[in-house]
Image (cartoon, rainbow, N blue to C red):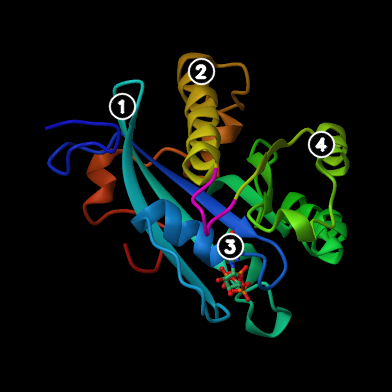
Amino acid sequence: MSNLYGDYNQKIDYVFKVVLIGDSAVGKTQLLARFARNEFSVDSKATIGVEFQTKTLVIDNKTVKAQIWDTAGQERYRAVTSAYYRGAVGAMLVYDMTKRQSFDHMAKWLEELRGHADKNIVIMLIGNKCDLGSLRAVPTEDAQEFAQRENLFFMETSALEATNVETAFLTILTEIYRIISKKSLTADDDDADGNSSLLKGTRIIIPSEQESGKRGGCCGKS
Ligand SMILES: Nc1nc2c(ncn2[C@@H]2O[C@H](COP(=O)(O)OP(=O)(O)OP(=O)(O)O)[C@@H](O)[C@H]2O)c(=O)[nH]1
């Protein structure tokens, strides 16, 4: 059996690590719960340290395992920053559209991300909690402008109502796939050893055989 989310007996062609970042309580954990398990919890506890969940899907007839990492927005609960970003090929910068401050902090989060992650990482800005429309504190245009200026994808979501959550994850994963598959075919960014800089230090592509035990640089549950 094969559908959008793949067949569990199928071999994995790619593993894409995507990180979630943003202030505490913007909804990172619930966006992940909605995408990975189609669940939502109203009494979500603050994340302590780092967690990740995986979801397997099919893009362009290839089986892609999305490994989505979630960390604490609260400084005191944050784990070692560089380890969190290592190997990430995508990032979702999440703010709460009812909390202006969480949007104003996006520049700071973006700076941290760009300071630690691969320069080719695909980034999406997410305005979460769009179900709370009457409490909106961040106009869509402000976010669009920021996204355009910083060259980010942008989407407004609701983890509660499952609005745009799947679309957001599929959009970023498809864009990562588009870049990776193009990189696999071209040698534009090759270094002196013939290795693509995008592929080299970042383990963007983890071949299926490495999935079964030889995977490097990752920890956590799957
Ligand atoms: N109305 C509404 N509430 C949401 C939505 N997403 C998350 N919440 C609520 O917002 C609160 C915080 O959600 P979390 O997912 O734990 O936030 P977080 O960004 O992971 O927080 P940290 O782990 O502290 O970084 C919880 O009470 C959630 O139920 C949403 O789309 N709409």
Q: Quadrant of ligand 1?
A: bottom right
Q: Residue at x 86, y 38 (%)?
A: 141
Mark 2 lies on residue: 182
Q: Residue 220 appears at what percent x and percent y?
A: 39, 69
Q: Is mark 1 within 8 Å of ligand 1?
A: no
Name of the residue lying farthest toward the bottom = 76
Q: CA distance from mark 2 to mark 4?
A: 27 Å
Q: Is mark 4 within 8 Å of ligand 1?
A: no
Quarter of the image where the N terminus is located = top left
Q: Amino acid at mark 1?
A: Lys
* The residue stretch that appears in magenta: 158-163
Viewer-proximal residue among 131 and 103: 131
Quick one: label 4 or label 3, which is nearer the N terminus?
Answer: 3
Check residue 62 in the rendering and tell me which mark sits there, or answer none. Answer: 1
Which SS class for mark 4? helix
Which SS class for mark 2? helix
Q: Amino acid at mark 2?
A: Lys
Check residue 144 in the rendering and tell me which mark sits there, or answer none. Answer: 4
Mark 3 lies on residue: 28
Quick one: label 2 or label 4, which is nearer the N terminus?
Answer: 4
Quarter of the image where the C terminus is located = bottom left
User: Position of 100 compared to 87: left or right?
Assistant: right
Q: Is mark 3 within 8 Å of ligand 1?
A: yes
